Image (spheres, rainbow, N blue to C red):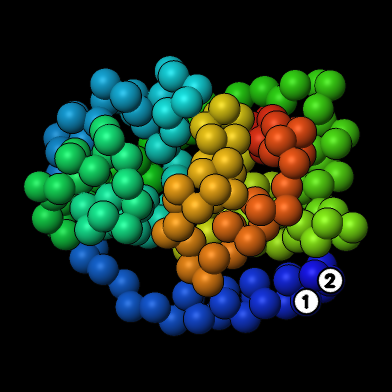
Amino acid sequence: MNNRIVIAAIFSLSATFAAAPAGAAGDAAAGKAKAMACASCHGADGNSANPEWPSLAGQHAKYLAKQLANFKAGDRNNALMSPMAAPLSEQDIADIAAFFESQALKGGQADPALVDAGEKLYRGGNATSGVAACMACHGPNGMGNPQANFPRLSGQHAAYTVLQLKAFRTGERANDAGKMMQNIAARMTDAEMQAVASYMEGLQ
């Protein structure tokens, strides 16, 4: 598929997501206490020590709330997260999401050997295979688009990002609107996933 067509479709969907109704307003102070159960995996301040578990600090609250709601509803499955989300109310979800959004992400470093390939894919995509440029949705600095509910990727563990890309590719993860990420990941090689994930981890 032509990259321009893919990017145009993404921006069209972006406008649709921006018009979606907002959920409950979150209280970061209340969320701090409610997020204590999350600390063992994601860190007390949302900075995960395990690279296969995502850092949540600085992530958009709207995106975090959607993921928790998806885990609760079964639209996204994970043996650890699904039971954690099950008892949460809409207000609990909003408060926890607000707390993690308020925290500072420590970020990481890219593998120097992968930077060039990762940057090329992130900024320009792969016209031959039809992989759209990541920055079309996630921004030039990887900060995402909270209005369209596209997540922040800068500073995220590369190992976690690769796991999610592979899950989208196989259909194991399918909670992306319009199958956008599934369609993109299906066209990516393992090497491309590793390179772009490493590049994004080093973005500031």
Circle 2 sits on which residue? 2
The structure residue drawn at horizontal position 18% and vertical position 30%, both measured from the top left corner, is 37
Residue 117 appears left or right of 134? right
Give the position of the N terminus as an image quadrant.
Answer: bottom right
Q: Is residue 32 above or below residue 86?
A: above
Q: Residue at x 73, y 53 (%)?
A: 187
**Left or right: where 80 falls relative to 92:** right
In the rendered image, is residue 32 in sight? no
Using residue 104 as the reference point, say whether residue 80 is left or right of it. Answer: left
- Residue 47: name its quadrant: top left
Residue 148, horizontal then vertical, whole percent: 51, 68
Q: Position of residue 103 (x, y in %)?
A: 39, 36
Three-letter amino acid code at the position of disc 1: Ile
Q: Residue furthest top?
A: 49
* Residue at point 54%, 48% (across, down): 170
Please report the residue visible at 57 percent of the width from the left and 74 percent of the height from the top.
14
Task: State the residue position of label 1.
Answer: 5
